[in-house]
């Protein structure tokens, strides 16, 4: 099976971005201080903590572009050395290798973060080709949530319909469309994405994709972007889309069609 | 009492003894010299007496009184005078039933007492039910009449015996009872207490194994229920002596029979269970009674009924949560509301608007979005919500603007409204129409800019007592460090703020942060920040009573908005949920002012009625109170009959229809025969046997035909061989000298009268 590299092109996404940039100046810059914004912090640690530079910036931009939410233009980078991690109940952790060992204080902060309702998102930048990061995350999760572990998330979970209706998770790769998560009464406390979501989102300074999406190309990238949007919508709205009123309305609409 | 007397003499100086001898010789010589003049006899008597007194002084005479040791033993007999002693039972099914106290009375006779006395045992006869008492009659037992004590506090009686045992040489205790003295939990404590007395505790079991009775063994009903929701009430029925017989069990509300069931209790001592389903369509406290229809020949009817109270709450609280732009604050509030199973949450969050649609024309079937049903929510369904939360919601848009008068009317008619700040709602002035603006404590027709800045939270004096924020204070009344918020809406009080009872509870950076108002019959909360979520998410949260400040704040707000009983300004309660008949019912009334601080000097009138009596039925008691400085007033009500009662209070000067100023509370008065809840004596007999064995006492089972023994085990007397002795010195008493002097003067006087001196 041969894979053709995806050629950068001026497609619908780029057009929309350009159009909205014209229509809504400031939409891609820092929102005015008078707007309720969302920070989507990324964890910095000793090691390759940022294998897909700009991925979170792009995620914030796409969410801002497609939804009414207002993520900050430059999501912050936090460490576990102090209390920065509590800036937001969302923490994005990317990597492609082992995680450094955590001392009791750092581990305690992560435990408190999760206990107070924070959501941890682990993004496997190797796209499923190496187990190092995955195994390290599994170990870390076992320490944060004693007695529990990452388990496959049902495709019926509200994460897959918090904004877009999706059939699974893809990123730069599509090796494992299953999201693995730790749940608390149905609410996701931590999740592991194995398909390198950051790789699909990351763009260079010219707005061009840094990495090809394999095997689906641009369509896969769009699906990955949609998953990213769903991820942020789920983080803010939780199981809102599982409310009975929404489910019934959506089912009625489908029958009507 | 046998008393012994002994005189003893001490040593004295030879000179003193010589002087006494000389005085004696001189006296005899004088008498001999005057023998011819008569009066010798009288003078001689006086001189002898004087000399004897002087001899006593000189020889230091002492008197010793001695009581010989008491060689009789003392035995304390505790007769159970609780009502369960009246229950009839028999050794076997063919034997005649006999009340337990009569079985004792026939066995413990005057001859029993005499026999024990002949054996050297004196009795101290006591009684116990809920109190320890002394039997004062001439009869050998206190069972001349049927006992009627409402409890059997043997533990208390034995504890009280500890001092008596130590002080009065009691060498043993006999407990005469049916053993229905305490729950299983107390049995071990009873045995331990008996052991610490240090004397044998003998037991005489009055019960017999065969009885005939049917009774309500237990009722399982939830203390709370939701209106129009079915709740299950499980009733366990037990029976003795009626194998295979069916009984009807009825559920009453007042005098009305709600349901009937039939049960056949098992014969092996277990319970037969029936289940009733009830659903109240009204909110409030309701008393229910279950009753089993027992046969006429059963041991007692006192255990055939049980009354209980179910507090019926409103059905699930319906909350409409509308957010204009999801953020972490929306997440936090949703997380909180979803956690409460009693909340039915309906949410609508604006996820994208026209600009977003233009930028991303994804087909609708690929989106999980539904239209915002404004007409359905704000016109048709609005009245069904207990609370409407508009969180950073630009209510002037999304076709909601036209419904703002409906929302205002909803509030004035009793609805709850929460407005949470941000850039879209409070941050965009001019959206509200006049009627909507009038129910809000902040001015929404002028700019209330949304500012991102550090905001330290300060609680106002009104906030310290208000139910929304009072819970934030720690035990010392201090607001813990809540950490700074990161934004605020610079709101201003509305011109009509005072007219709708506006209270500023929290402030920050010089402007109100949290406000409440009570326009019409409704309640409104305005939170002028979008970063309250930080009160529930931080590294060093100041937990209050184990809860995050965020939870404390919102739960307080929701309770107040929904008029939870705890946030009412007039309250009434009793010191206990149920009473035994005859017990005084202590009623406490609390009043709070508009600022939720204790309100003193409030005149309150109250009534106590049967919970399910006719509406025109005269009250059982009435009272008038005035609250003191702490906003409380208390009274005591006695003489209430058995059953469920409701105490209702009202601020003086308000009408009965004014529910705002009325509070009610339901309580129960139980019959005195809770003591009679279970007639089976076998367990009590086993307990009494164990008690005797543990303390080295004897066990007598009258129900099995045992005879009383001639004596009971006693502790060896520590007092034996010791006598009570008291010595009194006579010689050094001043009166003795005066007596000697008086006798001498009398002698001289007699001699002068005879012309001898």
Image (tube, rainbow, N blue to C red):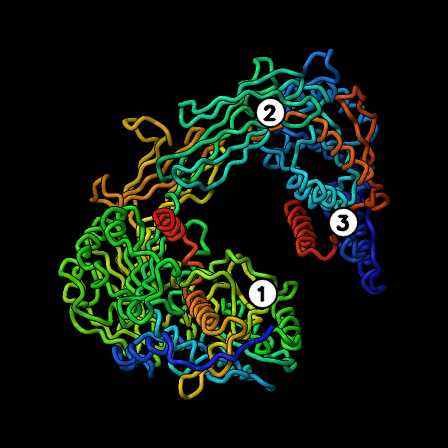
Is residue B309 left or right of B322 when viewed as pictured?
Answer: right
Horizontal placement of B505 versus B31: left or right?
left
Which chain is mark 3 on? B
Name the residue that disc number 1 marks.
A180
The residue tagged 3 is B726
Residue B620 coordinates in the image, percent (x, y): 34, 31
Report helix, strand or loop for mark 3. strand
The quadrant in which the N terminus of chain A is found is bottom right
For marks 2 and 3, the one nearer the N-term is 2
Instruction: Please state which of residues B536 and A96 is positioned toward the viewer in this rendering.
Output: A96
Task: State how far apart marks 2 and 3 are (Cα).
Answer: 46 Å
Q: In this rendering, which labeled residue sits more in front, label 1 or label 2?
A: 1
Q: Which is in the foreground here, disc 2 or disc 3?
A: 2
Q: Which residue is mark 2?
A: B147
Q: Residue furthest bottom?
A: A205
Up the image or down, B257 lies above or below A154; here it is above
B230 up-or-down from A90: above or below: above
């Amino acid at each position: 099976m041969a894979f053709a590299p995806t050629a950068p092109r001026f497609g619908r996404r780029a057009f929309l971005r350009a159009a909205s940039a014209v229509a809504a100046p400031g939409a891609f810059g820092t929102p005015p201080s008078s707007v309720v914004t969302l920070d989507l912090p990324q964890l910095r640690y000793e090691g390759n903590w940022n294998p897909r530079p700009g991925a979170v910036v792009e995620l914030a931009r796409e969410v801002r572009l497609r939804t009414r939410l207002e993520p900050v233009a430059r999501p912050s980078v936090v460490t576990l050395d102090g209390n920065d991690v509590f800036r937001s109940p969302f923490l994005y952790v990317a990597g492609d290798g082992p995680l450094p060992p955590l001392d009791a204080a750092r581990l305690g902060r992560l435990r408190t973060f999760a206990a107070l309702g924070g959501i941890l998102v682990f993004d496997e930048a190797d796209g499923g080709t190496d187990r190092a990061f995955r195994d390290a995350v599994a170990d870390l999760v076992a320490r944060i949530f004693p007695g529990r572990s990452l388990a496959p998330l049902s495709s019926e979970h509200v994460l897959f319909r918090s904004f877009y209706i999706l059939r699974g998770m893809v990123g730069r790769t599509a090796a494992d469309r299953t999201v693995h998560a730790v749940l608390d009464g149905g609410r996701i406390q931590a999740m592991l994405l194995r398909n390198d979501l950051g790789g699909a989102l990351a763009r260079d300074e010219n707005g061009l994709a840094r990495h090809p999406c394999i095997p689906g190309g641009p369509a896969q990238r769009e699906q990955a972007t949609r998953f990213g949007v769903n991820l942020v919508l789920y983080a803010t709205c939780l199981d809102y889309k599982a409310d009975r009123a929404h489910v019934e309305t959506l089912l009625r609409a489908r029958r009507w069609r | 009492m046998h008393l012994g007397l002994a005189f003893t003499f001490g040593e004295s100086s030879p000179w003193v003894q010589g002087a006494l001898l000389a005085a004696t010789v001189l006296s005899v010589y004088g008498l001999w010299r005057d023998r011819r003049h008569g009066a010798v006899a009288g003078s001689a008597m006086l001189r002898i007496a004087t000399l004897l007194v002087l001899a006593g002084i000189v020889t230091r005479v002492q008197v010793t009184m001695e009581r010989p040791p008491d060689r009789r033993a003392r035995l304390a007999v505790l007769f159970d005078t609780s009502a369960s002693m009246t229950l009839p039972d028999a050794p076997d099914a063919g034997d005649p039933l006999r009340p337990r106290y009569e079985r004792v009375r026939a066995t413990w006779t005057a001859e029993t007492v005499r026999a024990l006395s002949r054996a050297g045992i004196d009795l101290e006869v006591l009684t116990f039910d809920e109190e320890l008492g002394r039997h004062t009659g001439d009869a050998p037992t206190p069972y001349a009449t049927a006992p009627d004590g409402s409890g059997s506090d043997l533990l208390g009686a034995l504890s009280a015996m500890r001092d008596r045992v130590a002080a009065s040489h009691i060498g043993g205790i006999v407990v005469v009872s049916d053993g229905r003295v305490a729950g299983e939990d107390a049995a071990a404590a009873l045995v331990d207490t008996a052991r610490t007395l240090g004397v044998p505790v003998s037991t005489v079991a009055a019960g017999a194994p065969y009885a005939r009775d049917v009774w309500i063994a237990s009722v399982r009903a939830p203390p709370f229920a939701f209106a129009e929701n079915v709740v299950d009430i499980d009733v366990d029925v037990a029976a003795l002596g009626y194998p295979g017989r069916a009984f009807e069990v009825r559920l009453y509300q007042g005098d009305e029979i709600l349901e009937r069931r039939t049960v056949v209790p098992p014969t092996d001592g277990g319970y037969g269970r029936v289940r009733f389903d009830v659903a109240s369509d009204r909110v409030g406290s309701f008393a229910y009674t279950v009753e089993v229809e027992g046969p006429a020949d059963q041991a007692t009817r006192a255990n055939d009924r049980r009354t209980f109270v179910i507090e019926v709450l409103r059905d699930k609280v319906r909350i409409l949560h509308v957010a204009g732009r999801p953020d972490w604050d929306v997440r936090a509030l949703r997380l909180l509301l979803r956690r409460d199973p009693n909340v039915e949450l309906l949410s609508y969050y604006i996820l994208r608007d026209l600009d977003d649609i233009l930028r991303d024309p994804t087909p609708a079937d690929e989106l999980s979005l539904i239209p915002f049903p404004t007409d359905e929510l704000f016109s048709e369904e609005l009245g069904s919500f207990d609370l409407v939360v508009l969180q950073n919601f630009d209510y002037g848009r999304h076709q909601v603007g036209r419904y703002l008068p409906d929302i205002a009317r909803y509030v004035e008619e009793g609805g709850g409204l929460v407005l949470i700040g941000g850039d879209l709602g409070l941050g965009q002035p001019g959206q509200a129409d006049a009627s909507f603006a009038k129910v809000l404590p902040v001015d929404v027709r002028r700019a209330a800019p949304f500012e991102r800045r550090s905001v330290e939270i300060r609680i106002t004096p009104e906030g310290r007592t208000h139910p929304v924020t009072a819970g934030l204070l720690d035990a010392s009344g201090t607001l813990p460090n809540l950490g700074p918020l990161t934004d605020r809406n610079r709101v201003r009080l509305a011109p009509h703020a005072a007219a709708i009872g506006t209270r500023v509870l929290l402030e920050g950076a010089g402007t109100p942060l949290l406000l409440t108002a009570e326009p019409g019959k409704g309640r409104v909360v305005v939170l002028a920040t979008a970063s309250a979520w930080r009160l529930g998410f931080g590294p060093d949260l100041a937990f209050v009573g184990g809860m995050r400040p965020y939870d404390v704040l919102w739960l307080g707000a929701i309770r107040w908005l929904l008029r939870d009983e705890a946030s009412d300004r007039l309250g009434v309660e009793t010191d206990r949920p149920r009473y035994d008949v005859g017990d005084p019912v202590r009623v406490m009334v609390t009043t709070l002012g508009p600022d939720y601080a204790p309100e003193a000097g409030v005149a309150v009138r109250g009534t106590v009625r049967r919970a399910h009596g006719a509406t025109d039925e005269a009250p059982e008691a009435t009272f008038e109170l005035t609250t003191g400085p702490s906003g409380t007033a208390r009274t005591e009500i006695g003489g209430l009959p058995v059953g469920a009662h409701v105490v209702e209070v009202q601020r003086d000067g308000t009408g009965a229809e004014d529910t705002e100023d009325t509070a009610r509370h339901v309580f129960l008065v139980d019959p005195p025969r809770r003591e009679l809840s279970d007639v089976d004596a076998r367990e009590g007999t086993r307990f009494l046997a164990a008690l005797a064995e543990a303390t080295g006492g004897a066990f007598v089972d009258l129900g099995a035909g045992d005879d009383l023994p001639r004596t009971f085990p006693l502790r060896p007397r520590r007092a034996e061989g010791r006598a009570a002795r008291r010595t009194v010195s006579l010689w050094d008493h001043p009166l003795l000298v005066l007596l000697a002097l008086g006798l001498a003067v009398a002698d001289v006087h007699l001699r002068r009268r005879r012309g001898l001196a």
